Image (cartoon, rainbow, N blue to C red):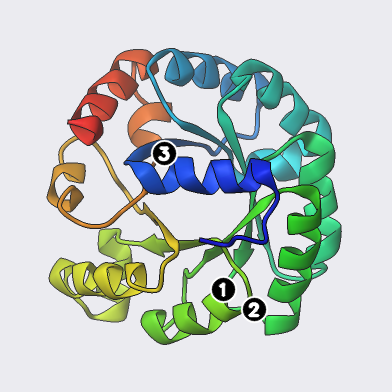
Amino acid sequence: MKKYLAGGMMELLEKLLKGKNLQVALDFIDLKNAEEVAKQSIDGGVDIVEIGTPLVKSTGIEGIKKIKKIAQSKIILVDTKTADAGDVEAEIVNLGGGNIMTVLGIMDDSTIESAVKKAHEYGILVQADLINVKDVVGRAKEIKKLGVDIIGLHVGLDVQKKRGITIRDLKNEIKMVSELGVIISVAGGLNKNNIIDLLDLPINIYVVGGAITRSKNPFEETKEIVKIIKG
């Protein structure tokens, strides 16, 4: 645990570390659609509301603010997928009222350090997204030293095929990365059927997108997944 962090950040870290959290990924372009699904998933018990990269690009700071207003006390993750100018994008997340921002783990250390420094000044946590990183465990160790709070891993079938590995290999990676003492977030085609296979792993955040956002009843779908995760 990072004892130098401000009180609010410490509380957020502790909350994420304590149990299993469901995050809904609002990967929309249209804000009205995002707002409707946000309302239903919040009513269904979601813990983290993610303002997806498409929504960030299409609606900017105002879009973040509007989702934040709906989410109220829920945790807001802004999926900036920062590749450059980490400090500037941390400022964007701060202006919108976000609690967590994301950086691409494959990018230069200086970008990640810049994001972490500025984000922590604002009381914002930083998640490194390890998409397209070949040596996941090795890079996670490097990123941990840069001050990143959360490591985001991808477990989808497309990722498995591209990397030529199995779900067993991915499970081993998750276990090894968790031993670094960081919060673990997992994404990649998760739904109420396959999320069960990951419940025995040290995962703190389960990210669900289309299974909720494209369902006929996002409220009921969220409720079912929350029930599975929380046991």
Q: Position of residue 231 (x, y in %)?
A: 17, 31
Residue kind at label 3, given as amino acid type: Gly
SS category of the residue bearing label 2: loop
Q: Position of residue 152 (x, y in %)?
A: 45, 61
Q: Earlier in the sequence, mark 3 or mark 1?
A: 1
User: Which of the 4 quarters of the picture holds residue 86?
Assistant: bottom right
Residue kind at label 2, given as amino acid type: Met
Residue kind at label 1, given as amino acid type: Gly
SS category of the residue bearing label 1: loop
Q: Residues within 10 Å of mark 3 (few under 14, many from 20)?
A: many
Q: Position of residue 110 (x, y in %)?
A: 75, 81
Kindly identify which numbered label has been placed on residue 105. Answer: 1
Mark 2 near mark 1, Cβ–Cβ under 8 Å?
yes
| In front of the other: 207 or 142 | 142
Q: Which residue is mark 3?
A: 209
**Residue located at (55% from left, 61% from top):** 149
**Residue located at (80% from left, 49% from top):** 122
In this view, 139 is above or below 98: below
Asked if residue 214 lies left or right of residue 65, the reply is left
Asked if residue 72 lies left or right of residue 152, the reply is right
Any part of residue 206 in sight: no
